[in-house]
Image (cartoon, rainbow, N blue to C red):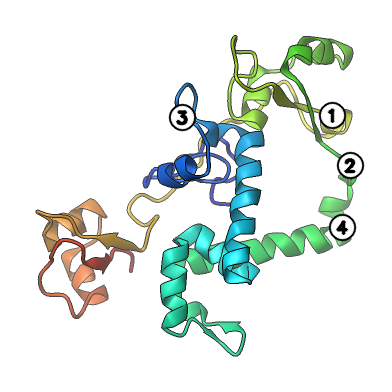
Amino acid sequence: MESGNNPQAKSPMGALGLWQFIPSTAREWGLSSTRSDDRKNVIKSTQIAINYLSYLHNQLNDWDLALAAYNWGIGNVKKAIRKGLVKNNTINLKLLPRETRNYLIAFHHLNRLIKFGYKSEDFRKFPNRPYLTIIKQSNIDNYLNKNDLLGMDPKVLLHINGYDVKRKNSLNPDILVPTQTFIKFFSTNKISFKQSKKKKGCSNRYYKVRRGDSISKVARRFKIKIDTFNKINPSIAHLRPGLLVKVCP
C-alpha cells in the first residue's frame, strides 16, 4: 500500500520496493543487494513479505498488531502493548503513530474492496482471473511471440517485475508476464512508470535525536516551524542523543 503498487518506490527513510522493506529488515530476511536489490524483485520480495507477516502474526497473535508491527516495528508494538495498546481485545488506535493508524485503515479499506468490490460496476467489468503468470526467464521470447507481445513496451515487464527481466546473467530464473486477461483489459504499449511521491519529512512521525542536533536543525530537516516543533513536543526544552521527538503535527 505504501508503495502505490510501484516496485521502484523509495521512501525518504530508505524503504524500497513493492513491500517497502528497509535495508536492515531486507538483510535479516535474506533479500540480497549484492548484484541487484531484491527489494525491487516482485516475486522474491512478496514471498519474504508473506514470511515476515506470518512471523509477526505468530509473535503477536493478531493480524492488526502484525500489520502495525510491519509498519512501525515489532519492538515498538510490544512496548506499546505493555503501555496498554490492547484492552479487552481492542486496539487503542490513539496509541499508534498517525502513519501506522493510517496504514491499518488503508489496509481494511483495501480488504473491503477485495471482498465486496464485485458489487461495484467499476470492478465487475474485470473478471476474477489471473492477470499475471510466472514463467522461466529462458522462455520469455517464446512466450512473448506466442502471445503476440513482441511489441510490448519493455516498461510493462519492468513494472510488474521490478527489474530488467531481459538482463543477461540474471540470478532470477522466474519472471512475471501478462496473461491474456491482462492483455484484454490493459495496454501493453503504454504505461505510466512514475515513482510514488511521498511527503518528505513526514514519512515517520518520530525522529531519534543524534549528536549535534538542535531543535532548529531538526525543525529545518523536517520542514516544520520551530513553534510547531515546540507545540507537538511540549515537555522538551533541550535535545539529547537518543531522545525520540515528534516531527509530524
* Residue drawn 87% across the image and 30% down it: 184
Q: Amino acid at mark 2?
A: Arg
At mark 3, the secondary structure is loop
At mark 1, the secondary structure is loop
Number of numbered discs: 4
At mark 4, the secondary structure is helix
Give above or below for 70 relative to 85.
above
Q: Position of residue 82 (x, y in %)?
A: 43, 81
Closer to viewer: mark 4 or mark 3 = 3
Closer to viewer: mark 2 or mark 4 = 2
Whether residue 11 sits left or right of residue 236 in the image: it is: right
- Residue that label 2 marks: 129
**Closer to the N terminus: mark 3 or mark 2?**
3
Q: Quadrant of residue 38?
A: top right
How many other residues sit within 10 Å of disc 1, few (<14), some (14-19) or many (≥20)?
A: some
Whether residue 44 sits left or right of residue 178 in the image: it is: left
In three-dimensional space, the C-alpha distance between marks 2 and 1, rounded to whole angstroms, equals 9 Å
Closer to viewer: mark 1 or mark 4 = 1
In three-dimensional space, the C-alpha distance between marks 3 and 2, rounded to whole angstroms, equals 33 Å
Quick check: can you spot residue 5? no
Q: Amino acid at mark 3?
A: Ser
- Residue that label 4 marks: 118
Q: Amino acid at mark 1?
A: Thr
- Residue that label 3 marks: 33
**Closer to the N terminus: mark 3 or mark 1?**
3
The tag on residue 179 is 1
